[in-house]
Amino acid sequence: MPWNKADLAAVVGPDEIRVAPDRKDGTPGGFVIVWAVEHDGQLYARSARGARGAWYRRALASGHGRIRVVDTEFEVRYVDASEDADHAGIDAAYRAKYGRYGHTVDSVVGPAAHHVTVGIIPID
């Protein structure tokens, strides 16, 4: 199910969202702050710690969890978007949204970050 425009706008408005992929046993994981962007109507997040990022590993392993933005939570699916995403477009979205943070944004843009791209899809 795609994001509706109002929910997607609410999710990408703040600089940070909190993701909580489920644990291996299916119980809810704890929330972790990440940067996320919208590109072509889809929500993406990348692991600033690369493949070592715990939230990233849990997201791909479970494929399910929650995100929290301000006071609103969404049940979501996490999907590996490393192969089929428009990485140039996602990189541009990250630079547009987070470029004011200088070199910090470099951890989530460019070829080294492409392989840790996660699509976040709402479950209704």
Image (spheres, rainbow, N blue to C red):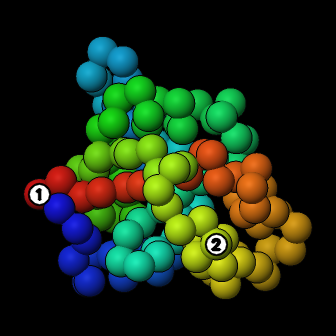
Q: Which picture quadrant has residue 120?
A: bottom left
Mark 1 sits on what residue? 124
Q: Which picture quadrant has residue 34?
A: bottom right
Judged from the image, the secondary structure of the residue bearing numbered disc 1 is loop
**What residue sits 71% from the left and 78% below the top?**
95
Q: Is residue 6 left or right of residue 51?
A: left
Q: Is residue 26 left or right of residue 101?
A: left
Q: Residues under labels 2 and 1: Cα distance?
A: 29 Å
- Mark 1 neighbour density, 10 Å: few (under 14) some (14–19) many (20 or more): few
Residue 99 percent across, percent down from the top left: 76, 79
Of the pair 91 and 20, the residue shown nearer to us = 91
- Mark 2 neighbour density, 10 Å: few (under 14) some (14–19) many (20 or more): few
What amino acid type should be assigned to the residue bearing mark 2? Ala
Of the pair 85 and 73, the residue shown nearer to us = 85
What amino acid type should be assigned to the residue bearing mark 1? Asp
Q: Is residue 62 left or right of residue 90?
A: left
Q: Which corner quadrant holds the N terminus?
A: bottom left
**What residue sits 51% from the left and 50% below the top?**
83
**What residue sits 63% from the left and 46% below the top?**
115
Q: Which corner quadrant holds the C terminus?
A: bottom left
Q: Is residue 47 above or below residue 102?
A: above
Q: Is residue 106 above or below residue 82?
A: below
Of the pair 111 and 29, the residue shown nearer to us = 111
Residue 109 percent across, percent down from the top left: 72, 63
State the mark number for residue 88: 2
Extreme front residue here? 84
Extreme top residue here? 25
Q: Pointers 2 and 1 in contact (CB under 8 A)?
A: no
Extreme right residue here? 103
